[in-house]
Amino acid sequence: MQSMAASSSSHSSSRGWAAVRRCPSPSLPARHVAFSSSSSSRCPVAGAGAPVLPLGIRGGRLPLPCPLLPPGGKNGASARRATAAAAAASPSAEGNAKPEAAGIPRTLQLGAMILVWYLLNIYFNIYNKLVLKAVPFPYTITTFQFASGSFFITLMWLFNLHPKPRLSLQQYAKILPLALIHMMGNVFTNMSLGKVAVSFTHTIKAMEPFFSVLFSVLLLGQTPSLLVVGSLVPVVGGVVLASMTEVSFNWIGFWSAMASNVTNQSRNVFSKKLLADKEETLDDINLFSIMTVMSFLLSVPLMLYLEGIKFSPSYLQSTGVNLQELCVKAVIAGTCFHFYQQVSYSLLARISPVTHSVANSVKRVVVIVSSVIFFRTPISPINALGTGLALLGVFLYSRFKKAKPKAKAA
């Protein structure tokens, strides 16, 4: 019996060691092999509590491949790649769906902003014209509008709605000429609105592209394309036609609108040069805000010198003007004056310059039509043709100006 037991034990031991030798090493393909015939223990697997080989066996205490993990070999690699591709496909599909879902709300938001921009322009031009008809003091009205803008800008910086600028005295000195030009441009606009119809002022201001190209050539050394130069022909021709048949034509109003074009476009050219300077840390909104505040400070002494003595409550009462009604109209005009420019800058940050230029061209049409309807301005067919021709030229200019030349084939 003892000999049989020993023989059985020896036979079992030899089979166990043979199984160990057949048990896969880390470098061999993964297979599940029994350690001995009398034990239910399996080949060691990686994981907590997994048995390990005895220390005396070569390769002991090394975790062996487990059948519960993804299989190795070519088939295993293919399976892992398929799993990773399936996992990557799901977020990608979600990402593609998000822009489509967000497209409609963004379009609605931009449409609402453009509508507000147009409405603010309409209300500003109508109420500003009513105020100028009651009190023909363009310097005082301009100062009040800059004061309204400075008030809202102070609130914007106070409540951190936009980062406050940190500028040196040298930077303020660079902005000072821009603020002076900005102030005079608005003074000339108000002078024109006080002398001629709103529709005629905006028809003349449609010549802004002409002066923009002129100053870009003279000051920036930029050469316009033939399409851009060609688009200026209907602009100039349309303004000439409209001026010849304008019922409310006035030389002061005409030259004031022209002077407004010169000052506004020179301001835009110098602003581009200032913003293009890498050393300057200014964005469009802060540059406009600083120019507004500085324009207000510059316009106060000019107003007091030219119109301060005339503009008084006793003078207004002697002319029969309702002071309370006048103040309400002036507040509405000043508020619309500031916010339509802010909305314009916000739109420019959300849409392309070409889209913004086209929207600005349509805005001028909307302002002209609304002012003609509100004030019942008489317009002859030739006058309407000239206005339409000038606006068509502005539209073409905005398209050709921003068009990028096609890349030449190699």
Image (cartoon, rainbow, N blue to C red):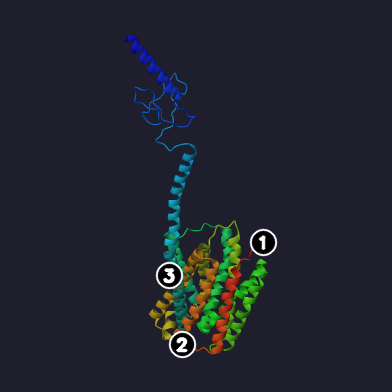
Please give the name of the residue rendered at 43% of the width and 82% of the height, measured from the top-left corner. Answer: 316
Q: Residue furthest left?
A: 1
Q: Which one is nearer the viewer's eye here, 206 or 224? A: 224
Q: Which residue is mark 3?
A: 112
Q: Which residue is mark 1?
A: 409
Image coordinates of residue 15 in percent, x first then y, are: 40, 20
Disc sitting over residue 203 in the figure:
none
Image coordinates of residue 79 in percent, x first then y, are: 45, 42
Label 1 sits on a secondary structure element that is loop
Image coordinates of residue 35 in percent, x first then y, are: 39, 24
Label 2: few (<14), some or many (≥20) within 10 Å?
few
Judge whether residue 204 can be spotted in this image. Answer: no
Dot 1 amino acid type:
Ala
**Quarter-of-image position of residue 120:** bottom left
Q: Earlier in the sequence, mark 2 or mark 3?
A: 3
Dot 3 amino acid type:
Ala
Image coordinates of residue 255 in percent, x first then y, are: 59, 81
Q: Which one is nearer the viewer's eye here, 102 or 23? A: 23
Quadrant holding the C terminus: bottom right
Label 3 sits on a secondary structure element that is helix
- The Cα–Cα distance between marks 2 and 1, rounded to whole angstroms, is 56 Å
- The Cα–Cα distance between marks 1 and 3, rounded to whole angstroms, is 42 Å
Please give the name of the residue rendered at 57% of the width and 69% of the height, measured from the top-left corner. Answer: 180
